[in-house]
């Protein structure tokens, strides 16, 4: 998960998307219709301390720096790491969760997983055993009428240096050919799973969030080309998803490779990791989504685009969101460019707990959910991050929906006037905040 934009989508069709308006489809996106409405199963096969802090709590305040899955397994050793993770894999996502997601009116689930599940290396501390749990979840997804996207969330050497890549720190993915080769091996492993469940898994994302500031974008695109060739040999009817590498929308054309079929661009939209968004007022957060709508609508005419990660967070106050034992920009407890809080007296107290939110805050979050759904459906849809969390309610789709802060089903919008009744590709937003 994380930062700025991501566009990702899933579909079961073979059409050319090169430099042309999306053509009429004879098949739909999986079982769910023309628009992706889904969630991520984050924190399952790639640990993130902020999603499941209970797994990392024993090291809080310790001089042992356990900050990600790499250090988690390195500290525990293979036997104990395997024991704990198997318990986690068997309980963090249950069939009840999948059934609940279906009941909330969603149609897709995105499943992040690391390279180590498919391309292990004895020199890495990661452990294996994920695939049976992955396939069990896929079967539950199919049983309850949803479709799945499998996402390669971390690759050898780390493509972004985030804990969500499996290893926090340096960006080392492109430092060796072996890292690239093992990444292709992981793509092929995921493709084989997709090929075994063609009516459920309708797309595979071949690399999550490569960081353009630490990588050669040209080499990222070359990897995508190689992944496309390998992926197509194994899962010819599935969609391949590529991430935008955090490039600005004006650079997205670089991913529109002539000759590609059934490829989707994935962008991630968060309002809390960069100053320009974090300092916005509530009203400004709502207005900012209009720009996001214009971006995805514009590029959707070249490649299908889906916003693969977004949330309702308007602060970065979730415990350990910025890293194990790190504070927040919002209240100034994390060093950042403002050298203090977003505004005098800004506090993280109660920011991530529904029980602490007053009616004005609840109204804002409902509005924020609807305006973002409107914006991302100007493209090909969205995946919320995350399906649930242990303590951060503004990232917990199930809890938000159950508290009526997210519409159920997603089309049951109070504040939005957005409709899919007319031509989707030409529709304009017409809500309180967006007038196009």
Image: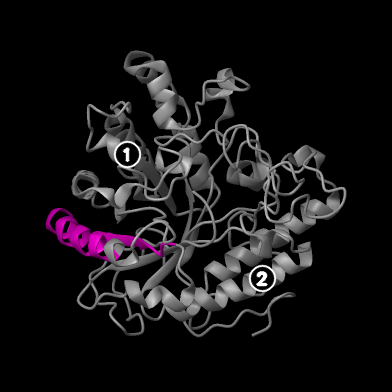
The residue that appears at 39% across and 44% down in the rendered structure is: 112
Q: Residue at label 1?
A: 139
Look at the image and give the residue range highlighted in magenta.
221-245
Position of the C terminus, as image quadrant, is bottom right
Across and down, in percent, residue 120 comes to: 23, 33
Across and down, in percent, residue 226 comes to: 18, 60
The residue that appears at 15% across and 61% down in the rendered structure is: 229
| Relative depth, front residue between 201 and 175 | 175
Q: Residue at label 2?
A: 288
Q: Is residue 237 above or below residue 294?
A: above
Q: Is residue 434 above or below residue 415?
A: below
Circle 1 SS class: helix
The residue that appears at 73% across and 56% down in the rendered structure is: 338
Going from N to C along the chain, the mark reached first, 1 or 2, is 1
**Is 316 part of what is drawn in magenta?**
no
Image colouring: one colour
Tell me if residue 34 can be seen. no
């Amino acid at each position: 998960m994380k930062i700025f934009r991501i566009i990702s989508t899933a579909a079961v069709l073979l059409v050319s998307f090169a430099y042309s308006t999306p053509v009429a489809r004879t098949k739909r996106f999986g079982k769910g219709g023309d628009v992706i409405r889904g969630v991520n199963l984050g924190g399952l096969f790639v640990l993130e301390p902020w999603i499941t802090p209970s797994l990392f709590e024993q090291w809080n305040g310790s001089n042992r720096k356990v900050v990600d899955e790499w250090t988690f397994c390195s500290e525990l050793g293979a036997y104990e790491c395997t024991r704990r993770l198997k318990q986690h894999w068997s309980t963090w996502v249950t069939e009840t969760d999948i059934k609940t997601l279906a009941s909330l009116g969603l149609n897709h689930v995105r499943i992040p997983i690391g390279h180590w599940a498919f391309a292990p290396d004895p020199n890495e501390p990661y452990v294996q055993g994920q695939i049976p749990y992955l396939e069990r979840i896929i079967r539950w997804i199919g049983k309850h009428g949803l479709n799945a996207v499998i996402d390669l969330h971390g690759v050898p050497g780390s493509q972004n240096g985030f804990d969500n890549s499996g290893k926090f720190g340096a960006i080392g993915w492109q430092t060796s050919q072996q890292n690239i080769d093992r990444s292709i091996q992981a793509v092929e492993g995921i493709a084989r799973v997709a090929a075994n469940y063609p009516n459920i898994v309708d797309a595979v994302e071949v690399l999550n969030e490569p960081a353009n500031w630490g990588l050669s974008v040209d080499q990222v695109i070359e990897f995508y080309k190689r992944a496309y060739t390998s992926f197509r040999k194994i899962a010819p009817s599935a969609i391949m998803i590529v991430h935008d590498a955090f490039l600005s929308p004006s650079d997205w054309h670089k991913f529109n490779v002539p000759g590609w079929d059934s490829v989707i661009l994935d962008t991630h939209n968060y309002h809390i990791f960069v100053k320009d968004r974090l300092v916005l007022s509530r009203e400004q957060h709502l207005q900012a989504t209009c720009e996001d709508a214009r971006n995805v609508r514009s590029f959707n005419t070249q490649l299908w685009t889906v916003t693969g990660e977004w949330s309702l967070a308007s602060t970065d106050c979730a415990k350990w969101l910025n890293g194990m034992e790190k504070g927040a920009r919002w209240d100034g407890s994390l060093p950042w460019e403002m050298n203090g809080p977003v505004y005098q007296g800004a506090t993280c107290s109660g920011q991530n707990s529904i029980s602490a939110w007053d009616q004005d805050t609840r109204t804002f979050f409902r509005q924020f959910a609807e305006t973002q759904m409107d914006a991302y459906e100007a493209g090909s849809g969205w995946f919320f991050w995350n399906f649930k969390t242990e303590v951060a309610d503004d990232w917990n789709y199930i809890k938000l929906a159950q508290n009526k802060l997210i519409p159920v089903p997603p089309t049951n919008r109070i504040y939005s006037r957005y409709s899919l009744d007319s031509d989707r590709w030409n529709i304009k937003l017409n809500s309180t905040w967006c007038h196009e």
